[in-house]
Image (cartoon, grey):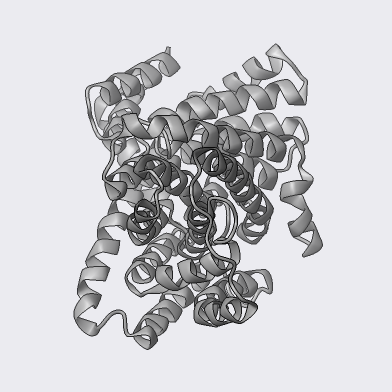
Amino acid sequence: MEILILVLSFLILLAIGVPIAWSIGISSILTMLVSIPALPAFTTVAQRMATGLDSFALLAIPFFILAGQIMNRGGIARRLIAFAKSLVGSLPGGLAHVNIVAAMLFGAISGSAVAAASAIGSALGKTMEDEGYSREFSAAVNITSSTTGMTIPPSNILIVYSLASGGASIAALFLAGYIPGILTGLFLMAVAGIYAKRKGYPTGERVKISEVFKTFIGAFPSLLLLVVVIGGIVAGIFTATEASAVAVLYCLILAFIYKEISFKNISEIFLGSVGTTAIVMILIATSMSMSWIMAYENIPQDITALLLGISDNKIIILLIINLTLLFVGIFMDMTPAVLIFTPIFLPVVQQLGIDPVHFGIIMVLNLSIGLCTPPVGSVLFVGVSVAGTSIQKVVRPLLPLFIAMLVALLLVTFIPELSMWLPGVFGL
């Protein structure tokens, strides 16, 4: 009874256009009202929202968001694009590959798919159009490649998963994300190259080694942030939260050295990051309340019994979970999806002997695909807006890139070593 009220009320609220955070909160209250009187129901939901945000690890999110805002304005994207162009610009469909590599680098440094889509799309969109690439193809490449930063660390969503899983190591999750994220980027490059060759898109000139070295030197301070942040976490020098504060300080210094921002821009950058942080935090708060209510109503245990009753075959269960998450990703943003569905599916996969770190990468990689799909795909909307086109026109070039992402997801799902090898090397 309770699960029906929870699901139906949530879907109805979404269907009539209620913002997702409010939909989660209201459906949570309605579910509680079935079990207990009104005052305790409202009080419980409010308490769980407040308790859900009472986590030191969550402090990393506003810091990484602020670091991403500084990078977006600090000239870092332009230098990463120049480096990517020197590396892969001479391949068939050169600028498409430049977009993908630059998005992987920028997404990894900023930890935000939306920031990567905005920064790289704005910097490369006009250039790609001038060289003969269609707006729709450029937008499709930018949209899909920007999601690789969700798995390549530092990633805010992996921190959220660590919280939802009850303490999966953030350092292990960060290391586990490298190979799947890079693998996804390589599959996107392969598909983009084939598509560009069939359409006759131009190939850039081969660049001299000296030019590659020059662009690398220009991008090196930005790339060094990855070494400082991830190296510091893995080496145990600081926690993920402390690393996020270090990232902000490093990006500020770098932006001032590049002379891309001034003290007059600081207030605007801070206000932008506060707005984004507020959206993320209200999503986390309401999602944590829904997770608690589901646990209170024994919904995860019921779903675990249901899934294991269907089959005890690991492959079948993982396929069911992946299909469910792909469907969920179409209608729900990543943060609430991770917070709500991790407590449901993690007990199932643990009974099948799947490591929580491996499952975290599967989940994030899966839900990243939802960022590129309507009706709530935030990266999709940013990508088409920056490109000056429409969703309807972007769908056709998006489809082969979606297939590339799905192939990468299946490989990561059924070959655990792709996720677990690096954490194993570092003893995590």
- On the question of residue 103 being in view, the answer is yes
At x 50%, y 73%, the residue is 242
Residue 207 screen position, x and y as percent: 58, 71
Q: Between residues 150 and 218, which one lies in front from this camera angle?
A: 218
Q: Between residues 70 and 32, which one lies in front from this camera angle?
A: 70
At x 43%, y 49%, the residue is 142
Q: Residue furthest bottom?
A: 257
- On the question of residue 296 being in view, the answer is no
Q: Is residue 78 above or below residue 119?
A: below
Q: How many numbered callouts?
A: 0
Residue 291 screen position, x and y as percent: 46, 35
Q: Quadrant of the N terminus?
A: top left
The image quadrant of residue 312 is top right
Q: Between residues 33 and 107, which one lies in front from this camera angle?
A: 107
At x 51%, y 81%, the residue is 221
Q: Is residue 89 left or right of residue 372?
A: right
The image quadrant of residue 208 is bottom right
Q: Is residue 128 above or below residue 337?
A: below
Residue 12 screen position, x and y as percent: 29, 19
At x 32%, y 70%, the residue is 73
Q: Between residues 214 and 422, which one lies in front from this camera angle?
A: 214
Q: Quadrant of the C terminus?
A: bottom right
Residue 323 screen position, x and y as percent: 57, 24
The image quadrant of residue 288 is top left
